[in-house]
Amino acid sequence: MVLNPNRQRDQRLMQAGFGLLLIGLWTVAGLFSPRIFPYPWLIVEAMIEQFASGAMTAALASALQAIIIGYLMAVVVGISVGLAMGLNDFVETFMDPYLDALYALPFAAIIPAMILWFGTGLQIRVVVVFGFAVFPIIINTLEGARSIPQNLSDLSRSFDAGRFYTIRHIIIPYELPYILAGLRLGSGLAVRGLVVTELLVAVTGFGQLITQWSAAFRMEGVISVVLVLMALGVIFTWALGQVEERAIGWDVSTIDN
């Protein structure tokens, strides 16, 4: 949906005003309990200190590497599995109970066991990011394939179109809004999976930073790490939202017409 410039400006002003309100409330809370609610400028100073020491930069680089690898794996597997299930009844019947079981699997609860399998480095972060991100992509792709109008399939068969041509020129364009929505949802969950892993694997990366600063009772350093993780999730989700907004021209209406 495209908003007019005035409405976009009003929305940005409202968002900025709400952000300033939150900072003001946090500052007031700091007057009563500065140890629990450190002043915003102390949080900024802690963040600068973390970046200056190189610890934040190293943690951020490691996190981005895990997110990119795990998320790209989830995209490839999620779209492939979702299309296969949506276009083939046998594949859907075969895989559906296993997909439901894996979807219900509490990844956060088995991360301690996964540490034994994959260690505490890049591998476990990639696996958890993949596990969190892949299911929304599969489910949305599957739902898109299920919702393809019968008249499109009939039209393709009436022109004796091949299977590959039908998938490429009819199914994929119709599926694209569903796939993009799944990618956007998966991106947010990918960052969430990374955060869970970082908190439980506290020997490297962001988890190590949080542990060090919390052990020193310096909440400003802990909050600065949390803010960086939040910014990472917001930027990643925003980027996928921009891709979805620009590609949404492949809409159902354009195919039906």
Image (cartoon, rainbow, N blue to C red):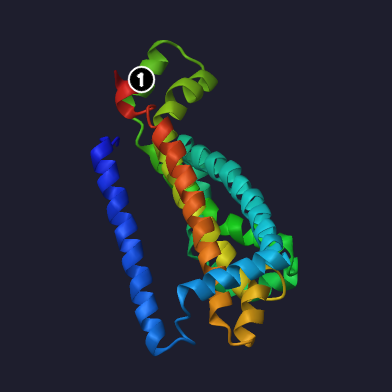
Residue at image x 69%, y 65%?
Answer: 52
150 sits left or right of 118 in the view: left
Quarter of the figure with the C terminus: top left
Quarter of the figure with the N terminus: top left
Q: Quadrant of residue 207?
A: bottom right
Q: Quadrant of residue 45?
A: bottom right
Q: Quadrant of residue 143?
A: top left
- Residue 96 visible to an observer of this rendering: no
The percent position of residue 24, horizontal first and vertical second, equals 34, 72
Height in image: 215 above or below 5? below
Residue at image x 54%, y 59%?
Answer: 191
Height in image: 194 above or below 149? below
- Specify the amino acid type for callout 1: Asp
Residue at image x 55%, y 63%?
Answer: 228
Secondary structure under the numbered disc 1 in the rendered image: helix
Residue at image x 47%, y 14%?
Answer: 161
Height in image: 108 above or below 35? above
Closer to the camera, 187 or 228?
228
The percent position of residue 145, horizontal first and vertical second, equals 42, 36
The percent position of residue 134, horizontal first and vertical second, equals 54, 51
Q: Which residue is mark 1?
A: 154
Q: Residues within 10 Å of mark 1 (few under 14, many from 20)?
A: few
Closer to the camera, 111 or 239?
239
How many circles with numbers are drawn on the protein? 1
Closer to the camera, 157 or 128?
128
- Residue 244 visible to an observer of this rendering: yes
